Image (spheres, rainbow, N blue to C red):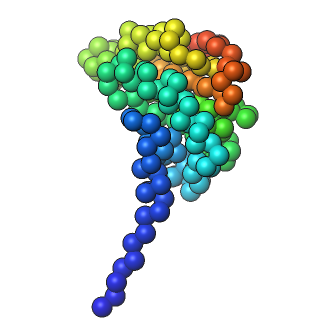
Amino acid sequence: METKMQHYPQSTAAQQMLTEHFSLEEFQRSSTATLHGIDNTVPTEYIPTLVQLCRTVLEPLRQFAGRPIVISSGYRSNALNVKVGGVYASQHTLGEAADISLPQTPYTSWKDGKAHTDLETAYKWFDFIKENTNFDQLILETRNGLDYWIHVSCRKNSMKNRHQVLHINQSQP
Ligand SMILES: [Zn+2]
């Protein structure tokens, strides 16, 4: 009888918790990477930087929000960063940045019948990070003026954090 060998080295490593509520997998999963066969494994040297981002910003935000925080884009290998159109040398490629999904309001609230960002909660989270954490860059971003996400980064050397706050609306000319 043939025995099927089952190995799960990647998933086992990915289940590694960086902090109490955030796993390594949450920072390396990417539907774009999967779709295009791009390896988006976080290099070991960047793991302490991700842990710092979790401890400094994401865990305090989770406690403030009182609900799980969803990372829509964490680490990006250079190949993935190019594929998603990220800026050159993006902090995502260094394990210094994360994009945070924001809660949505019910679809009935919007004329197009779709669910979009609950801006009241978005600004609460944004202001919490701004006023309570040691971040490098904090950006409220949108492409269509309806769906927003928060980009936040912490430098590997936290002494170099710039505390830069930006709003980027790519729908504006
Ligand atoms: Zn980002």
Give above or below for 100 relative to 20: above
Give above or below for 132 relative to 50: above
In the displayed structure, does residue 172 sit left or right of residue 146? right
Residue drawn where x is 46% and y is 33% of the image: 71
Quadrant assignment, res 22: top left
In the displayed structure, does residue 37 sit left or right of residue 78? left
Residue drawn where x is 43% and y is 26% of the image: 59
Residue 1 image offset from top left, x and y in percent: 30, 91
**Quadrant containing the C terminus in the rendered view:** top right
Can residue 171 be spotted in the picture?
A: no
Between residues 78 and 14, which one lies in front from this camera angle? 14
Can residue 117 be spotted in the picture?
A: yes
Residue 93 image offset from top left, x and y in percent: 65, 39
Between residues 107 and 159, which one lies in front from this camera angle? 159
Instruction: Give the farthest residue toward the right.
Output: 88
In the displayed structure, does residue 98 sit left or right of residue 119? right
Residue drawn where x is 55% and y is 29% of the image: 53
Residue drawn where x is 29% and y is 13% of the image: 109
Quadrant assignment, res 162: top right
Give above or below for 68 relative to 94: above
Number of marks drawn: 0
Residue 170 image offset from top left, x and y in percent: 60, 19
Between residues 114 and 25, which one lies in front from this camera angle? 25
Residue 143 image offset from top left, x and y in percent: 54, 22
